[in-house]
Image: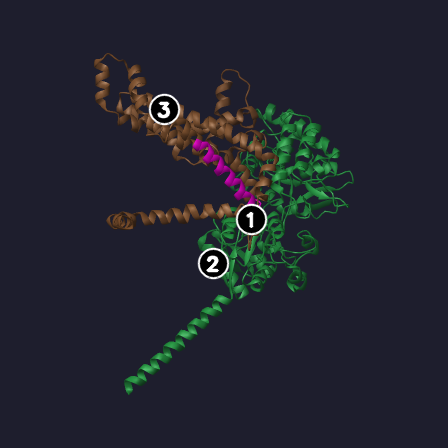
Chain colours: A brown, B green
């Protein structure tokens, strides 16, 4: 057995050597900080010096915090809506783009849809503030129909839809691009055969394109599920006293309660809970979509 | 033989030179003081290197002056959390409390008590403000000023308002109404919201709560019980007054969603507001900006006002949280670090932290400071626009921005009380306090709930979070 292993090790030694830098990168920059964070979550809040272990105290503190449950609720609502809408809109956009015959028009739409993904959240936040400010473009447009100005940015009932829409607007183009690439790889003979059999475009979409995209869909859904509980940047740029109740998410809670107060233990416990939640959601999604099935 | 002798001499020389070099290194290391600085230092890498040299020249120490270009709080947390060791840290007052509570800072009480520099340069009243349970964990970076009411007199003059007669909430309400009416109906700028207050940290409200005789933050009574005056019954009329301003279009809705930068631009650049509450230094900066834009004083002429009179007849203003220098508990060179703290409290240190570096920010001409183009761009601020030293004469900085000295002078009036917010002996989680208060009281001001209900809601949440008893 050992000889077989040794022989294989020797045979693939070049590949193992090539893998070493990658392994080192992940150990140093991912697993070590993760492990350190995990240990810190069981230690007292001390930025300097020795940190005595305090058992589950930090977890108890976080879970008992009145704002924690509200943050979980906000994170789930925003995250799940985002996941569904990112997926749906980007798929529809990719299917529409596939139907555009003019290459230039197609590429222009693709670029325009993809462009917001290149902007930082701070820029996106600024753009949305300009649009939805009380004296912004949206209200100027509504005034054309004699509609009273709406204070979009400070109306609690509009806070979540705005944040979700902002995310969809930013990321739709990116996921649509992934779908488009997958559509391009579908065997053209299938379409030809369908056409000979008298299938129209809609039938081709529902019977060829969508079934062919199953693998890509599963991957995108799993990727999106990883982000359900990790919304922070867009919240940070858009939060204000009027909408805080509706959009204060878990990572904002971790940032404000832990990091701003130098409470390393509390912040690590909060972050670990986010990670456990993410693993659970991703696991469920993988099972639900049959991601791991052959 | 000759060769042997040559080799012997060579070996001796190598050891001698190596030894000297090593000794030099040891000596250099012994005095190398590592500083992590927030706002204090050079404005860019080039100037920061010059600042470091100036600091070294003044203290005789070998200093590494590390100043992150942005995101100081995160950098501080990351560096300390990662185990990096510093001798001196720039902190705000809350950070000092948080780290001192964790035992992460060196107790400086005996050093400060024994320091002749501190006794000769630092006002004991200022010193008392940074005490924590009778101890000192930091020294000063600068003298903190205070926010006060800033009004664009160029507009109020046109409306015919005498600013000296404004003492009550009703006076200010009437003034804002007249300005709104004038701007909307005579000037034709509709809608015009004359007043901006930055709500996210309920930061700018003290001049109004003075009318109720209460202060922001959490205090401890004689029995040690923690209470928040802003949610007590006497504060209610002020919240109702703010709600009335919003309801009647006198308060800019951007107060809830905008940033301080928006407020400032609206004040001097576009004159979209006529009144805000901002730092005393900003009275001058508004006018200075307007002067550059050619709108001072006919369109923009900002003056500072003390706000509203308290029931006891004084004007209660809030002093800004201190910016401080602390020595971490694991510092390698605490004595040398304290030398830097002392230097920053001298008038010479004050000059470096305000005017900047001689030969770069300014030159001496006929015994007076003449600012270079770079120095003018740096606006006499390298971390301390108002140095802490009582011996520092602001006059050496030349002509101040219009209106700033008058605003600063308001704080020295006998009928004005400038005091810090309530820190509950360093126990207050300020971020949480701000969030809870601004959330509930925004609902009150926007008319979503009554002042009573909002104050009760805020009080309950403060209590659940153990911020008050």
Asked if residue A177 is positioned above or below residue A1 in the image, the reply reads above
Tell me the SS state at disc 1. Answer: loop
In reply to whether residue B86 is colored magenta, the answer given is no
Tell me the distance, in whole angstroms, between the alpha carbons under discs 1 and 3.
45 Å
Relative image position of residue B371 (x, y in whole percent): 51, 54
Residue in the image at 48% along x and 61% along y: B53
Identify the residue under disc 1: A43
Asked if residue B399 is positioned above or below residue B462 in the image, the reply reads below
Tell me the SS state at disc 3. Answer: helix
Q: Are marks 2 and 3 on the same chain?
A: no
Q: In front of the other: label 2 or label 3?
A: 3
Mark 1, chain letter? A
Tell me the distance, in whole angstroms, between the alpha carbons under discs 1 and 2.
41 Å
Which of the marked residues, 1 or 3, is nearer the chain's N terminus? 1
Which quadrant, please, contains the C terminus of chain A? top left
Tell me the distance, in whole angstroms, between the alpha carbons under discs 2 and 3.
57 Å
Tell me the SS state at disc 2. Answer: helix
Residue B50's tag is 2
Residue in the image at 62% along x and 46% along y: B404
Mark 2, chain letter? B
Q: Are marks 1 and 3 on the same chain?
A: yes
Residue A134 in view here: no
* Residue sitting at the far bottom: B1
Identify the residue under disc 3: A91
Task: Give the residues drawn in magenta, as a range.
Answer: A260-283
């Amino acid at each position: 057995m050992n000889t077989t292993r040794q022989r294989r090790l020797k045979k693939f030694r070049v590949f193992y050597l090539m893998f070493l830098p990658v392994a080192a990168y992940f150990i140093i920059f991912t697993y070590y900080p993760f492990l350190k964070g995990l240990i810190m979550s069981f230690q007292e809040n001390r930025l300097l010096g020795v940190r005595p272990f305090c058992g589950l105290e930090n977890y108890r503190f976080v879970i008992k915090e009145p704002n924690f449950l509200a943050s979980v609720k906000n994170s789930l609502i925003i995250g799940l809506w985002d996941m569904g809408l990112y997926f749906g809109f980007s798929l529809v956009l990719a299917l529409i783009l596939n139907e555009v015959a003019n290459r230039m028009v197609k590429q222009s739409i693709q670029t325009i849809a993809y462009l917001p993904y290149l902007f930082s959240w701070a820029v996106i936040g600024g753009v949305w503030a300009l649009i939805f400010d009380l004296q912004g473009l949206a209200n100027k447009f509504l005034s054309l129909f004699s509609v009273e100005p709406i204070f979009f940015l400070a109306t609690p009932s509009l806070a979540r839809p705005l944040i979700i829409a902002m995310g969809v607007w930013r990321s739709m183009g990116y996921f649509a691009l992934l779908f488009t690439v997958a559509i391009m790889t579908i065997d053209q003979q299938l379409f030809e055969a369908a056409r000979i059999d008298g299938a129209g475009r809609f039938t081709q979409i529902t019977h060829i394109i969508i079934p062919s995209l199953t693998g890509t869909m599963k991957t995108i859904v799993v990727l999106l599920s990883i982000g359900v509980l990790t919304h922070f940047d867009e919240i940070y740029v858009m939060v204000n006293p009027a909408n805080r109740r509706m959009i204060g998410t878990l990572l904002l809670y971790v940032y404000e309660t832990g990091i701003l107060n130098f409470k390393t233990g509390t912040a690590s416990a909060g972050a670990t809970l986010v990670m456990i939640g993410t693993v659970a959601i991703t696991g469920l999604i993988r099972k639900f979509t049959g991601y791991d099935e052959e | 033989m000759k060769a042997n002798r040559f080799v012997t001499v060579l070996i001796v020389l190598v050891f001698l030179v190596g030894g000297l070099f090593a000794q030099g290194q040891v000596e250099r290391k012994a005095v190398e003081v590592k500083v992590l600085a927030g706002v204090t230092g050079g404005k860019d890498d080039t100037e920061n290197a010059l600042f470091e040299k100036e600091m070294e020249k003044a203290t005789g120490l070998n200093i590494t002056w590390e100043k992150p270009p942005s995101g100081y709080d995160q950098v501080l947390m990351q560096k300390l959390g990662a185990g990096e060791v510093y001798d001196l840290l720039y902190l705000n007052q809350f950070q000092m409390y948080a780290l001192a509570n964790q035992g992460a800072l060196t107790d400086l009480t005996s050093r400060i008590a024994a320091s002749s520099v501190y006794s000769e340069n630092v006002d004991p009243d200022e010193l008392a403000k940074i005490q924590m349970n009778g101890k000192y964990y930091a020294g000063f970076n600068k003298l903190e000023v205070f926010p006060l009411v800033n009004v664009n007199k160029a507009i109020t003059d046109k409306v015919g308002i005498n600013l000296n007669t404004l003492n009550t909430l009703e006076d200010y309400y009437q003034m804002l109404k007249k300005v709104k009416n004038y701007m909307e109906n005579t000037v034709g700028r509709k809608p015009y919201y004359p007043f901006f207050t930055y709500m996210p940290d309920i930061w700018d409200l003290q001049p109004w709560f003075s009318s109720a005789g209460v202060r922001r933050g959490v205090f401890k009574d004689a029995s040690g019980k923690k209470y928040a005056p802003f949610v007590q019954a006497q504060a209610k009329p002020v919240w109702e007054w703010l709600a009335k301003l919003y309801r009647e279009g006198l308060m800019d809705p951007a107060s809830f969603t905008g940033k301080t930068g928006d407020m400032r631009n609206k004040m001097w650049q576009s004159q979209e507001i006529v009144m805000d509450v901002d730092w005393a230094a900003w009275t001058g900066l508004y006018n200075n900006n307007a002067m550059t834009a050619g709108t001072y004083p006919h369109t923009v002429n900002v003056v500072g006002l003390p706000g509203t009179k308290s029931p006891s007849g004084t004007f209660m203003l809030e002093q800004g949280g201190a910016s401080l220098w602390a020595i971490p508990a694991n510092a390698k060179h605490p004595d040398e670090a304290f030398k830097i703290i002392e230097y920053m409290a001298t008038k010479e240190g004050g000059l470096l932290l305000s005017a900047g570096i001689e030969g770069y920010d300014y030159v001496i001409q006929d015994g007076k400071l003449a600012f270079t183009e770079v120095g003018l761009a740096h606006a006499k601020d390298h971390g301390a626009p108002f140095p802490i030293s009582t011996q520092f004469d602001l006059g050496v900085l030349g002509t101040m921005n219009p209106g700033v000295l008058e605003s600063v002078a308001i704080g020295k009036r006998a009928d004005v009380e400038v005091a810090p917010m309530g820190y509950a002996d360093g126990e207050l989680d300020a971020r949480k306090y701000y969030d809870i208060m601004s959330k509930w009281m925004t609902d009150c001001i926007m008319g979503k709930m009554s002042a009573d209900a909002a104050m009760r809601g805020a009080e309950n949440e403060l209590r659940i979070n153990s911020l008050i008893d």
